[in-house]
Image: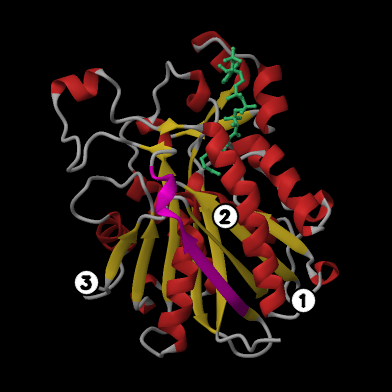
Amino acid sequence: MSVPHSRILGTGHYVPERVLTNQELEAKVDTSDEWIVSRTGIRERHIAAEGEATSDMASEAAKRALAAAGIEATDLDLIIVATVTPDMPLPSTACFVQSKIGARRDCPSFDIAAACAGFIYGLDLADKFVRTGAAKYVLVVGVELLSRVMNWDDRTTCVLFGDGAGAAIVGASDGERGLLSTHIYADGGFTQSLQIPGGGSVEPATASSVAQGRHTVHMIGKDIFKAAVKNLSAASKAALEQNDLTTDDVDWVVPHQANLRILGGVSERVGIPMSRFYLNLERYGNTSSASIPIALDEGVRAGEIKPGQTVLVCALGGGVAWGSAVMRF
Ligand code: ACO
């Protein structure tokens, strides 16, 4: 088994107060609680307040993770924010977070865009920075404010997503506990399957692009569904193989919380029962890069994910980009 070099020293999460239920969505679009629950498992999601920004949510989650790790914001050597819903295209959301949490003015801070796999990409980077000695303490945040990029008239997407932030402090491992491996992947053959087509260099914002809803999420759900089951299963198996772990060794799978049916497929293919999948998508919907750190933090604070347990995380999202990580928590 691999020797851990870095460890998650503390986690935190934040979700906005406002809860939007399936019943409320029934009043907005032609859908039903029954359809949403049976196709996805989602019952409600949290929606950011007017004026609340991505960096506000990220900063709250970060402060909670710092407190859990027992370090100060000024101790951070690196801030990585994984998001596809930044405060603005320029500057990075990470720079807003640096300022809002009171980190050092010279602390390198940048965003990464790997959609729902963003937190695992961030963990992978953090592990490498810690491993090489380039950083002692790294803040990794997964945060999304997807309600601002939804077409609230499109029932095929607006029922799926929610807002939220999760954060982890990654530092050096002092023993057996820590990250055992990370695997990250991407397949640019699926760029059409999940997009916000407007607002970039291909389709700069115009009055017409806004009127046509080009700045909202467009998705071919079936493509993503199939890619998710296949690649999440393969990445999970790769993670176990690399560490000579059997499925019985895994205490918890903390997956990206997109859809219960996707996870059912992964459970079957990998051979780990759903009872060992840590799930909260029923209450939050799909919060993209935030979903794994939110679930990890909930599990830790509820006393269900315990020190020393073997935890497998896996995620896939737009790109498609995906990955997995195993840790002795
Ligand atoms: N309410 C009621 N009916 C709906 C709704 C809705 N909210 N959305 C779609 N339908 C209808 C469709 O219009 C279609 O009707 P039709 O047969 O008359 O044309 C019917 O339901 C079936 O639609 P499908 O798209 O075939 O439904 P499917 O079983 O594929 O489920 C879903 C759709 C849930 C989106 C599924 O494809 C899925 O989960 N895909 C993965 C997408 C995902 O999770 N994306 C998140 C980002 S990436 C990630 O996080 C992994």
Is 222 magenta? The answer is no
- Is residue 306 among what the camera can see? yes
Above or below residue 236? Residue 201 is above
Provide the residue designation for mark 1.
245
Q: Quadrant of the N terminus?
A: bottom right
- Tell me what residue is drawn at x 75 percent, y 61 percent: 252
Q: Distance between the Cα atoms at labels 2 and 1?
A: 19 Å
Q: Residue at x 50, y 75 (%)?
A: 170
Q: Alpha carbon of mark 2 to alpha carbon of mark 3: how far?
A: 32 Å
The kind of residue tagged 2 is Ala
Amino acid at dot 3? Arg
Q: Which mark is residue 315?
A: 2
| Ligand 1 within 8 Å of the CB at mark 3 | no
Mark 1 CB in 8 Å range of ligand 1? no
Mark found first going from the N terminus, 2 or 1: 1
Left or right of 83 on screen, residue 213:
left
User: Which quadrant holds residue 112?
Assistant: bottom left
